[in-house]
Amino acid sequence: MSAKKALVAALCAVVALAGLALFVPIDAPGLGRELQERVRSSTGIPLEISRTRFRLLRGLLLEEVRASSSFVSGGYQVHVPRLILEHRLLPLLSGRLEATGVMLEKGRIDWAGGSVSVEGLALTLSRLDYDSRAITPLHGLGADALVALRRSAFESWELRELAARIATEGGRVRMEGLRFETDRGAFSGEAALDFNSLPFRYRGSVVGSPFELVEVGRGTLRLEAEGFGATTRNLQGKGSFALPRGRLPDAPWIRAIDPGLAGAEHSPVDIPFEVRDERVYFERLEIESSEGVLDLEGSLGLDGSRDLRATVTRRRD
């Protein structure tokens, strides 16, 4: 082989190796052990990583990640089968790891009061700080980011296609430009979560349009609410449901009041309500229909139960 051909072959080999280094994950158990130690020393959280692989352009690929922590009022356990920690390339060349994002396909958090699972999380960071002197890891974390989440499932409900701008400081999280979907409709608004207590507390203001109220119809829901934990039993709030002109549903509860009202045309109606004790309460409500005037008051349970009192004033021909 001539010297020229040997040089070309060597260059090709170098390019191939460089390509492998850029795109192909390389086992890096030392980085995994260093990351575990850094997290443990700075936060006190025992982090476990079964396998660590490194990609120069994409970042660290962590597999079977587990973490847990305990407080006086409770604790939590985290399990993530596969996580990508993205980084900036130039700082890495000088020996510093600066994270720019987090991606995971699945994950689960369990605590004494419940659990939540997540799928398809993408977090793009514009700021990430950590104060090791804070009383808990959550208090020490400070970040600004864009978040996108394909699905999040709690015990009795789930969110899909969530997107928001988030900021966290001192164990509190703010979400602005919030959008998400549920089985009943699409929502937009803002929310805040406070992890300074277990279970966590939350408050938010959302608009759902269109929103489907089962056996009532589709309209616009406005709600301001607060509560704590991942279940609905602690939810409290006030709001309204605007139902446009349409027809009363052919539903059992309508037929129980007056079979003649099923399918009758009705005028637009705005329904103010209050949420507490897993029920939606509304005061006297008047619905004008082609068959007469329906007066309603009572409550609807989040479990589908009803406690309604109704009178019907028939129209005279």
Image (tube, rainbow, N blue to C red):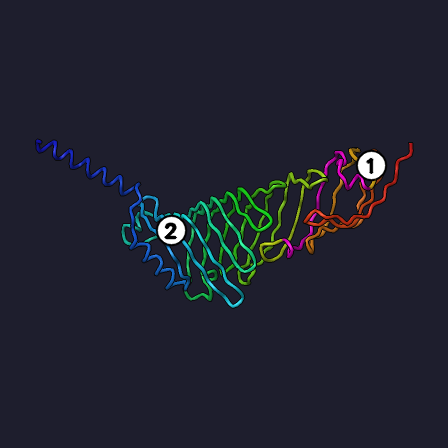
User: Is 253 part of what is drawn in magenta?
Assistant: yes
- Residue 156 percent location from the top left of the image: 60, 49
Gap between marks 1 and 2 measured at Cα? 63 Å
Q: Residue furthest bottom?
A: 72
Residue at image x 66%, y 48%? 223
> Is residue 313 among what the camera can see?
yes
Q: Residues within 10 Å of mark 1 (few under 14, many from 20)?
A: few
Q: On the rendered structure, is 274 left or right of 178? A: right
Instruction: For marks 1 and 2, give the one nearer the viewer.
Output: 1
Q: Mark 2 sits on what residue? A: 99
Q: Quadrant of the N terminus?
A: top left
* Residue hosting label 1: 259
- Look at the picture and state if 191 lies above or below 135: above
Q: Give the residue type at disc 1.
A: Pro
Residue at the image point whose x is 72% and y is 40% from the top? 215
Residues in magenta, as a range: 232-256
> 268 or 151: which is nearer to us?
151
Q: Position of residue 217 (x, y in %)?
A: 71, 38
Q: Quadrant of residue 276?
A: bottom right
Secondary element at tag 2 = strand
Residue 101 in sight here? no
Identify the disc placed on residue 177: none
Q: Earlier in the sequence, mark 1 or mark 2?
A: 2
User: The C terminus is located in which quarter?
Assistant: top right
Amino acid type, label 2: Ala
**213 sits left or right of 113 in the view:** right
| Residue 295 in the figure: left or right of residue 73 | right
